[in-house]
Amino acid sequence: MRAAFLIRNSLFVIAVLTLVGAGVLAQAQAQPPPAAVTAIRAGRLLDPEGGRLLTNQIILVEGTRIREVGPNVAIPAGAQVIDLSKMTVMPGLVEAHNHLALTYKPVPENNVYYYTYVQESTALRAIQAASNGIQMLASGFTIVRDMGNNALYADTALRQAIDQGWIPGPTIINSGIIIGGMGGQFFPTPEMVTDHNIVYPEYLDADTPDEIVKAIRQNILFGAKVIKICVDCKPYGYTADEIRLVIREAAKSGMKVEGHVQTVNGAKNAIEAGIWSIAHSGGLNDEMHKLMAQKGIWRAGTDTPPGLAGHPVSAQAYQRTIDSLKNAYQNKVPLTFSTDADYWVEGRTRGELVIDFIRTWIDAGIPNADTLRAMTINGYKVSETDQTRGPIKAGFFADMIAVPGDPLQDLNALRNVQFVMKDGTVFKKDGVMTPAAFFHGGPVNGWRIR
Ligand SMILES: [Zn+2]
């Protein structure tokens, strides 16, 4: 029995070795072509960390990564040269709070997002998300944190479609479905809640410790990369202990937790529990900002400027927004650029809408260098991409943009992104999208990306 097994086993081993050998030979015969090299001549190169411009730099890109950066880099023979000598080249921008698969509109929803859930399928919203992602990339946003309200995991589908290589788009850090106490941010009718229909599954009801654990696991199973909770959307919001449970369970899968916070008490609980990031500024006063700074908790303030058609912000409300952002800055709270943009303003792309939020930062008197840090370095950190993606440094993924003018002098330069490279491939050049190289008839980067 044992001998027979050994013989069979060695025959099997020989067969496997023969197959492997044939594979090695086939590989040796068909070497993949060397990755294409692109050389970018940058007239000015923005270093957001140092808040300075370097002049006449050359960036070598090989395949998907940056190979070398410097003033005296030799351009290899045969490299494709891109001339941005009249531009400011800079790392890609990060939007730390968007909802790409939600776009409510003046008609038919009267800008009430509750109705979008009733009117539009997950499938339609996923296709809208693909379009919104492309619009964001065209405005220079190479990373977007997509923080829920995306129907039945349209956000995961978007991330997979981009990562697998079907369509262009930013790097997506998505949250799946928002987890909260019964009802989430809604006030659904009793019929909706008991039958769990119509506006579900926009929120995962998680009222007990068991339900909280299960909701987090469901989101992770279905592709979330960050966990989003409603801290205080209802009077029975989460306690600090319940938030600690969320953080512990998310951490088991290596994920951080963002809290939607709208009250001071909610902020207190979230900060005490040590949450990763807080969305919205409604619950953040001077005391909360000081605690956030002490603990290094990210602020995703979603600081909306006035004058967006259909989204009135009163003079008083805007003053509060500005004062809060200013106070956070003075207290040295780690700041991210975030908008909560989940609606259509006619005549604007999603990217143009988002970039318009720089007005709030300008009006709050935040120095341009620090706003640029919030939009880049802090964005990479809050999205936890900072080890692989963001800075224009050797070894990092080649994501970068270019604008005429100098955003350190005038942030409005960011409104005019002329060039976008994502993963080493040109997406936009001379102000025109040229995305052909991003479209594939199959999952060229692998179907196992989940
Ligand atoms: Zn939001």
Image (cartoon, rainbow, N blue to C red):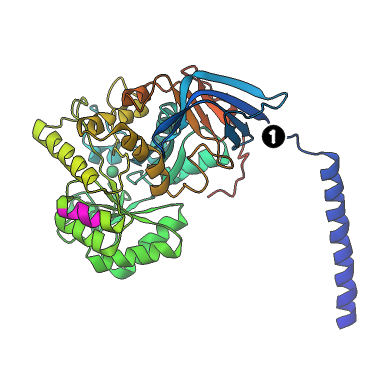
Q: Quadrant of ligand 1?
A: top left
Quarter of the image for the N terminus: give it: bottom right
Q: Residues within 10 Å of mark 1 (few under 14, many from 20)?
A: few
Examine the rendered structure and indicate whether residue 75 appears above or below residue 291: above
Give percent across and percent down for residue 74: 66, 28
CB of mark 1 near ligand 1 (< 8 Å): no
Which residue is pictured at 50% across the width and 49% down the height?
387
Give whichever of 395, 275 is nearer the camera: 395
Element assignment for label 1: loop
Which residue is pictured at 36% across the width and 35% down the height?
372
- Would you identify the image quadrant in which residue 307 lies? top left
Q: Residue furthest left?
A: 316
Marks counted in the figure total 1
Examine the rendered structure and indicate whether residue 181 appears above or below residue 97: below
Give whichever of 293, 129 is nearer the camera: 293
Question: Of the residues shown, which amino acid type is indicated by label 1?
Answer: Ala
- Would you identify the image quadrant in which residue 297 lies? bottom left
* The residue stretch that appears in magenta: 287-292
In this image, 51 relative to 271: left or right? right
Give whichever of 206, 94 is nearer the camera: 94
Give percent across and percent down for residue 197: 29, 51
Give percent across and percent down for residue 195: 27, 56
Q: Which residue is mark 1?
A: 35
